[in-house]
Image (spheres, rainbow, N blue to C red):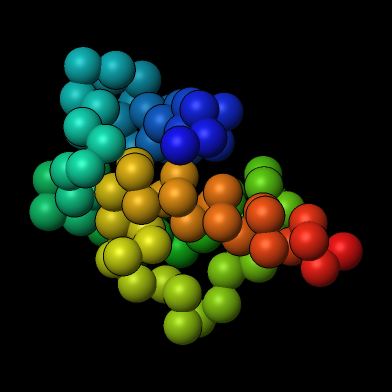
Amino acid sequence: MDTKVRDDVVQFIISNYLFGDTGRVPADGDSLMEGGVIDSTGILELIEFLESHFGIEVSESETVPQNLDTIANLTQFVTAKKTVEELSA
């Protein structure tokens, strides 16, 4: 797992959804939606963050829980996207 990607995602979640409450950060495998951390509008904000911060493009078909619903999935998704985009550059 890319620690830098994970840390950046966690910091974004803390700042934007938990209002600085580090005690409420879910475990890496916990659902952000089911845990009430993020809602459908929050997903859109999260996608904007991923695209601008990591320089990746998230297609509509990629906006699924397997990619965006846990910290672990987000980290894996971003790391894989960055690798693919770097290889094709």
Total marks in image: 0
Which of 88/27 is in front?
88
Asked if residue 38 can be seen in this view, the reply is no
Asked if residue 19 can be seen in this view, the reply is yes
Is 75 rendered above or below residue 5?
Answer: below
Residue 33 horizontal/vertical position (percent): 20, 55
Residue 71 horizontal side relative to residue 53, left or right: left
Residue 19 horizontal/vertical position (percent): 34, 26
At x 21%, y 42%, the residue is 29
Is 65 rendered above or below residue 70?
Answer: below
Which of 5/17 is in front?
5
In which quadrant is the N terminus drawn?
top left
Residue 85 horizontal/vertical position (percent): 74, 62
At x 21%, y 33%, the residue is 26
* The quarter of the displayed image where residue 58 is located: bottom right
Residue 36 horizontal/vertical position (percent): 15, 47
Determine the residue located farthest toward the left in the rendered image.
Answer: 34
At x 29%, y 48%, the residue is 70
